Image (cartoon, rainbow, N blue to C red):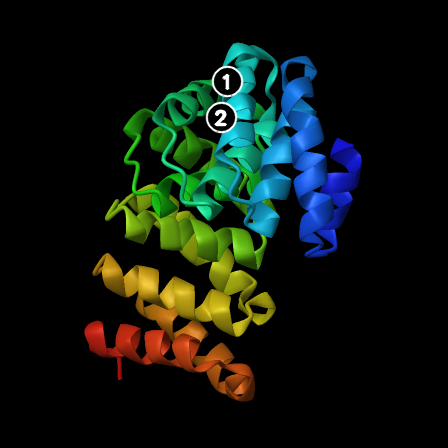
Amino acid sequence: MHITLWSVAKLLVYDWPLVDALSAAALPLSDDFGPQVISNMIWSMARLLVDNEGLLCALSTKALSSMADFYGQEIANTAWSLATMLKLDRPLLDALSGQARLRGGDLNPQECSNIVWAYAKLQVSDFPLLEALSSASVDRIRDFKAQNLSNTAWSLAALLLHDGPLLDAISAQAREGIADFDPQALANTAWAIAKLAALDTPLMRAISSAAIATMGDFKTQNLSNLIWSFAALLVP
C-alpha cells in the first residue's frame, strides 16, 4: 500500500480516488510503520500536496516514538516534506533536529542541503542544528553538486545567517563547478550573496559569465532575481 502511494507520488499521478483510498488504508496501520515507511508516506503526501491532517498526525506521532531509528535519508525526507507542505510541526522538527545532530557525521550532501533548506523554508532558526549542518557541509563540500550548493546558500540567506566558513566553501566549490549550474541555481546563489550583503566578486563574475552563456534558458523570475542581486551588490 505505501509502495503504491510512493509510486503514484514519484510519477506525479494525480489520481485522487486512488490516493484517498491508499491514505485511508494507511491510517489504521500507521502504528506498525518503521522509519523508512513513515518518511516515504510523508514524502508522498508532500509530493502530491495531499492535505490529510489525520494521516499526517498519525505519521508524526509514530515518527516521534521511533526517532532513534531515523537515519539521514529519513530525517532529510521528512524535514523536506514538512517544509514543502508548510507544516510547522515543532515537536517533530525538534526531534528531527536532535537526530540530525546525532547523525551529522553520516549525512551526505543531499541530506545536509535538504535539511537546512527545510528549516529555512519554515523559518525555524535552530542554531545547534545549523551549526552541525554547517560543519558537516564544509567537511563534504567537494561532494556538493550545484543544486546542493545553491540550496544551502539560499537557506543561509533566508535565515539571514552569515556563516563565513560555509559561504567561503560554497563559493570555492561553486566557482569550480559553475558550468553545472542551471539558471535557477545561478539566480538563487546570486540572490543569497546579495541578501546577505556578502560581496564575493570572483563568484559573482563566475555567475555572470555562466548566466550570459545560458541566458536563453532563464525564466522571468530567475532573471529578475539575478538582476536584483547584481544591482544590490553594485556589481558592474
SS state under label 2: helix
Say which quadrant the C terminus sits in: bottom left
- Looking at the image, which residue is at 48% across and 32% down? 136
Give, as a three-letter code, the residue at label 1: Thr
Q: Which mark is residue 4?
A: none
Give, as a three-letter code, the residue at label 2: Cys
Query: Residue 203, percent across and down?
Result: 39, 67
**Mark 2 packing: few (<14 Cα in 10 Å), some, or many (20+)?**
few
Q: Nearer the viewer, residue 91 or 193?
A: 91
Query: Residue 148, percent across and down?
Result: 53, 51
SS state under label 1: helix
- Looking at the image, which residue is at 35% across and 30% down? 131
Res. 25 in view: yes
Query: Residue 19, percent across and down?
Result: 69, 44
- The residue that label 1 is drawn on is 61
Quarter occupied by residue 93: top left
Position of 134 relative to 147 (above/below): above
Horizontal placement of 157 versus 72: left or right? left
Q: Which mark is residue 57?
A: 2
Res. 9 in view: no
Position of 200 relative to 151 (above/below): below
**Mark 1 packing: few (<14 Cα in 10 Å), some, or many (20+)?**
some
- Looking at the image, which residue is at 32% across and 25% down? 128
- Tell me whether circle 2 and circle 1 mark residues in contact (CB < 8 Å): yes
Query: Residue 78, percent across and down?
Result: 54, 33
Position of 104 relative to 121 (above/below): above
Horizontal placement of 59 versus 40: left or right? left
